[in-house]
């Protein structure tokens, strides 16, 4: 196992943020989320501009369902002009988990502005509109998702969502 090896290097080089980030990544891989959070936080404390460590912390906080903390990290990351459509989708998922449909849609549309054919973003828009009770909009975005040729798993889920809406 690599964790004891990296822990030993962290102990000998405690002020090296990349080692803390590496340790956090190893913990994340084995689903030790609390330990991963501690390691990522230490990396960020040592270097507040270490965006990779912040992104890892952001994802870990999302997995821990600590949404307010995740949003805080996400906003810091976005302030550094991160232009990844998938990052906006993760923000949208967090907002939707918090039942903040408007902010979820805002994040989804930022993603779609970057890539209108991004299947995941179109799917998320469909989910949010469905939960808001806006069936026509939900169907529109689920269809856009399917038109953008999603992977098989997303295609199956999207078709299931469309069938649910049609059954209503």
Image: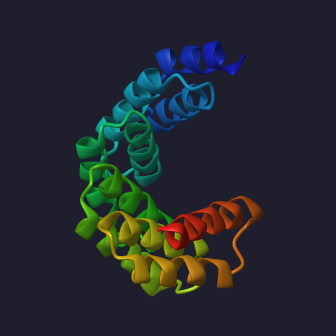
Could you say which quadrant of the image residue 128 lies in?
bottom left
| x 60%, y 74%: residue | 119
| x 24%, y 50%: residue | 72
The front one of 102 and 36 is 102
| x 34%, y 76%: residue | 134
Question: Where, quadrant-wise, is the N terminus in this rendering?
Answer: top right
Res. 84 in view? no
Q: Position of residue 140 (x, y in %)?
A: 49, 84
Q: Position of residue 112 (x, y in %)?
A: 46, 82
Q: How many marks?
A: 0
Q: Which residue is most to the front?
A: 167
The front one of 166 and 97 is 166
**Left-right relation of 9 to 151:** left
**Left-right relation of 106 to 60:** left
- Vertical position of residue 46 compared to residue 4: above or below: below
Res. 93 in view? yes
Could you say which quadrant of the image residue 16 lies in?
top left
Q: Position of residue 61 (x, y in %)?
A: 37, 38
**Left-right relation of 44 to 121:** left
- Vertical position of residue 160 compared to residue 9: above or below: below
Q: Position of residue 145 (x, y in %)?
A: 60, 77
The front one of 133 and 127 is 133
| x 30%, y 67%: residue | 132
Q: How are the residues colored?
A: rainbow
Q: Which residue is most to the right?
A: 152
Could you say which quadrant of the image residue 95 lies in?
bottom left
């Amino acid at each position: 196992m690599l964790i004891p090896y990296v822990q030993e290097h962290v102990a000998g080089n405690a002020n090296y943020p990349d080692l803390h980030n590496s340790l956090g990544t190893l913990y994340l891989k084995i689903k030790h989320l609390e330990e991963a959070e501690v390691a990522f936080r230490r990396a960020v404390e040592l270097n507040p501009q270490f965006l990779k460590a912040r992104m890892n912390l952001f994802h870990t906080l999302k997995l821990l369902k600590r949404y307010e903390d995740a949003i805080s990290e996400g906003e810091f990351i976005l302030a550094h002009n991160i232009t990844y459509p998938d990052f906006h989708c993760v923000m949208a998922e967090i907002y939707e988990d918090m039942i903040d449909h408007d902010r979820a849609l805002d994040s989804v549309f930022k993603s779609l502005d970057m890539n209108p054919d991004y299947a995941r973003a179109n799917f998320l828009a469909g989910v949010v509109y469905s939960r808001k009770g806006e069936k026509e909009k939900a169907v529109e975005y689920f269809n856009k998702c399917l038109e953008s040729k999603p992977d098989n798993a997303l295609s199956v889920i999207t078709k299931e969502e469309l069938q649910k809406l049609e059954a209503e």
